[in-house]
Amino acid sequence: MTEVLPKNRVANIFAKQIIRSATSVGANYRAACRAKSTADMVAKLAIVEEESDETLYWLELIAESNLLPADQLRPHWSEMNEILSMTISSIKTLKNKSPRTRK
């Protein structure tokens, strides 16, 4: 998706940020899968949640700046929202199962 952004300063900044936050989602999810404890997994999934939300933010800025049409962004928006929803659900489930992480 970032390859089709216009070649200008603002688009380049948005592209770098979205690449950073979106790839961080995958890297931190992988780390969560290898967590040594439930608390560690919850902490890593919290990073996935933050980075997913940040990616949504950059997608919003791209749309609001009219750098790409909304129909081109919609699939990426949907995928990030799904990832965010699943991550939040996983965090809630893990917190409810682990007495140490309950609030």
Image: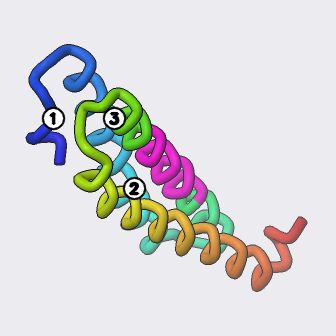
Q: Within the image, what quadrant is residue 20 found in?
A: top left
3 and 1 marks in contact (CB < 8 Å): yes
Q: Within the image, what quadrant is residue 89 found in?
A: bottom right
Q: Amino acid at mark 2?
A: Val
Q: Which residue is mark 3?
A: 62
Helix, strand or loop for disc 1: loop
Q: Which residue is mark 1?
A: 5
What separation in Å lies between label 2 and label 1 (alpha carbons)? 21 Å
Residue 7 in picture, x, y percent from top left: 10, 23
Membership of 54 in magenta stretch: yes
Q: Residue at x 31, y 58 (%)?
A: 76
Q: Which residues are magenta?
A: 46-57
Q: Amino acid at mark 1?
A: Leu
- Which comes sooner in the sequence, label 3 or label 2? 2
Label ID, residue 25? 2
Q: Residue at x 10, y 41 (%)?
A: 4
Q: Amino acid at mark 3?
A: Ile
